[in-house]
Amino acid sequence: MIEVVAELSRGPVFLAGEALECVVTVTNPLPPTATSASSEALAWASAQIHCQFHASESRVALPPPDSSQPDVQPDSQTVFLPHRGERGQCILSTPPKILFCDLRLDPGESKSYSYSEVLPIEGPPSFRGQSVKYVYKLTIGCQRVNSPITLLRVPLRVLVLTGLQDVRFPQDEAVAPSSPFLEEDEGGKKDSWLAELAGERLMAATSCRSLHLYNISDGRGKVGTFGIFKSVYRLGEDVVGTLNLGEGTVACLQFSVSLQTEERVQPEYQRRRGTGGAPSVSHVTHARHQESCLHTTRTSFSLPIPLSSTPGFCTAIVSLKWRLHFEFVTSREPGLVLLPPVEQPEPATWTGPEQVPVDTFSWDLPIKVLPTSPTLASYAAPGPSTSTITI
C-alpha cells in the first residue's frame, strides 16, 4: 500500500497568473502490527491543472461538436487524463509535468516532490451558477506497473482580475528583492510582483469615494433620495447606502434592498422557451435589508458582499453582474397620516387602518464587484489544503 498526499503551500485560493505550489509526498507506511513488510513501487506520477466547464441543458444551447475532429478520449485506463470521469468539457489545461519515474520505497520510507505551475491568466474564474459551472482542479495521476492510473484531485478556487493579461513582467532591476541579502528565483519574483500589482489596482479602483445621489420617483411624485458613496467594491466589503424620505411627496410605507447577482446567458447560446428551455437570466440574493419606514425621514443600510461569492465577469457563453434591487411600497392616499389624535375625550384604543391602498415598484442599481486578496478569500470557506489517496 502506498499513500499519496498533496498539500497546497498557501491554501486553495489563487489569482489567475499566480504560481501554484504543491508538495506531493509519497509514503510506504509501516503497519504498527506488522512483523514484516515489503517495498512498494510506482511506475510514474504526473500533475496537471485543468478547468472543467459544464452547462445546464435546459438553459444553454451549445453548438454540436465538430464531427471532423476525432474523439481523443481513449478507452485505456493507462492514459493520463486529468478530467477522466468528470461531467462537462475540459476547456483549459496546463501542460502535464512528470513528478517522478520508477519510484521504489522501503517500508516506512517517504519522499516528497515539489510541483509548481502558473495558473492560466486567460481562463474564466471559478463559478458555480444555475446555467454554467467553471471548476478548477489540480489532478495528480499515479500508476503502478500493469495497473490502471489512480487520480488524486485537489479542488482550487481561481479569481480573475481583468486587465492583467496585457501586463508585461518588468526587468530584474524593477523587481529586485527589498533586501540585498535575500535571493529569490525568477518565478517567485514574478509571482510576488503580480500579486502586488493586483493589490494596487484593486485598491485604486475601490478606494475612490464620491457621493452619488439618485432621485426615486413613481408615477405620482417623488418618493425620496438614495445616496451611495461608491459603485466599485471588493469581495468582503460592505455596500453602505442612505435613503432620505423626508423630501418625498409620496408616503413610503416599506422598502427592501437586496444585493443580487444576475447570471445571463449570451443571446447566441440561449435556449428558446418554446422548446422547454428555462429562463436565460437567473438572480441570486446574497444579502437583504427590509424596513417599515412610515414617518421615517432618513435611514441607512449595510449589505456585506460574501467572500465566497464570485466577482463579476463575462465569457462567450455567460455573464455575471452585480446590482442593488430595490422594492418600494407607497401609499395611494396623499398626505397619509397614521397618528393618534392629540386630544382624546376619553380613554380609547388606537389602531391602524385595516386597509391602505398601496402601489409597489422596483428599481435596480448596477454596481461592480472585483476580486480580493486570495489570502483573505481563503478565510470564507477554509477548505482542506491537503488531499490524500491510497494506492
Image (tube, helix red, strand yellow):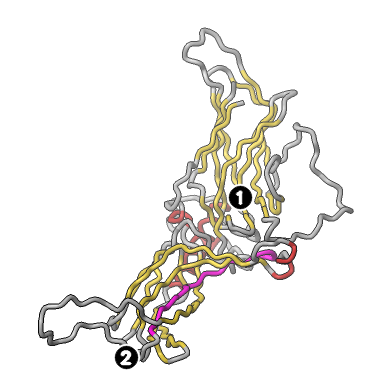
Per the image, the residue denoted by label 1 is: 136
Q: Say whether residue 317 is magenta.
A: yes
Indicate the secondary structure of the residue bearing disc 2.
Answer: loop
Per the image, the residue denoted by label 2 is: 335
The spot of residue 242 in percent (x, y) is: 35, 78
- Nearest the eye: 101 or 89: 89
State whether residue 209 appears in this view: no
Q: Identify the residue at image location x=44%, y=60%.
A: 306
Quadrant location of the N terminus?
Answer: top right
Q: Amino acid at mark 2?
A: Gly
- Nearest the eye: 325 or 98: 325
> Hey, which residue is sitting farthest left in the picture?
346
Q: Is residue 237 above or below residue 28?
A: below
Front disc: 1 or 2: 2
The spot of residue 288 in percent (x, y) is: 41, 66
Callout 2 environment at 10 Å: few (<14), some (14 to 19), or many (20+)? few
Would you identify the image quadrant in which residue 38 lies? top right
The spot of residue 285 in percent (x, y) is: 48, 64
Would you identify the image quadrant in which residue 302 lies? bottom left
Span highlighted in magenta in the image: 313-331
Q: Identify the residue at image location x=61%, y=16%.
A: 39
346 left or right of 64?
Answer: left
- Nearest the eye: 83 or 121: 83
Q: Amino acid at mark 1?
A: Tyr
Callout 1 environment at 10 Å: few (<14), some (14 to 19), or many (20+)? many
Q: Say whether residue 243 is magenta.
A: no
